[in-house]
Image (spheres, helix red, strand yellow):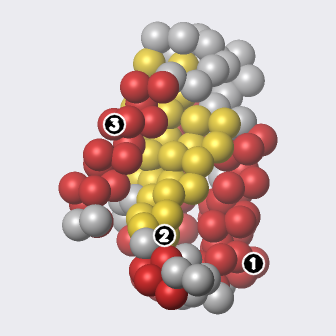
Amino acid sequence: EWPQSAQWPVAFAGFSGGAKRSCLVGAMLAKGRAVNTCGFYLSGMNHDVMSEAYKQYQPGGNFLNTPIWMSGGDRDPIATPNLVGLVQMSMRRTGFSRVRLERFAGSHQIKRSEVRLALQWFRQVGGF
């Protein structure tokens, strides 16, 4: 009913295990060009599923330019600051060129203001 919806920008987001799943779903949909992906918001993520999803689903080289906002608490016992930093480095080694890591005061949680900032950043770098 909305043929223009294929061009609408879509951001994928998730927290902890949901962040990992959003990487998989985003890569699957990007392969078939089912959506116009404008960015990923990944919070509390302690394992690089994005690189694995890229290798498995092979959504194309342009997918590596997708903005990725990573967010993590400075006292997170699950996605420790060290682990989140390693995830960021792993994504960059894969070839993702726009991986931004922001830390906040807190534990294993999502910070709502970070979501708003990430969406603004997606618009700035992606031109949406």
- Looking at the image, tell me whether mark 3 or mark 2 is earlier in sequence order: 2
- Asked whether the viewer can see residue 59, the reply is no
| 121 sits to left or right of 44 | left
The alpha-carbon separation of the residues under discs 3 and 1 comes to 30 Å
Tell me, for residue 56, which label it has, or none.
1
The residue drawn where x is 72% and y is 50% is: 20
Q: Which residue is mark 2?
A: 37
Task: Please state which of the two labelled residues, at mark 2 or mark 1, is closer to the viewer.
Answer: 2
Tell me how far mark 3 sits from mark 2, CA to CA. 17 Å
Q: Position of residue 62 (x, y in %)?
A: 43, 82
Q: What residue appears at the point 51 percent right and 87 percent down from the top-left corner?
A: 3
Asked if the residue under mark 1 is in contact with the one under mark 2, i.e. CB atoms within 8 Å, the reply is: no
Residue type at tag 1: Gln
Q: CA distance from mark 2 to mark 1?
A: 18 Å
Amino acid type at circle 2 is: Thr
28 to 111, vertically: above or below: below
Q: Above or below — where is 26 with respect to 115?
A: below
Residue 128 higher or lower than 57, as above or below = above
What residue is shown with label 3? 117
Mark 1 residue element: helix
Give the residue drawn at x 50%, y 57%: 11
Identify which amino acid the numbered label 3 is placed on: Leu
Mark 1 nearby-residue class (10 Å; few <14, some 14–19, many ≥20): few
One can see residue 111 in this view: yes
Label for residue 40? none
Q: Position of residue 8 (x, y in %)?
A: 43, 72
Q: Position of residue 61 (x, y in %)?
A: 48, 85
In the image: residue 101, left or right of residue 124: right
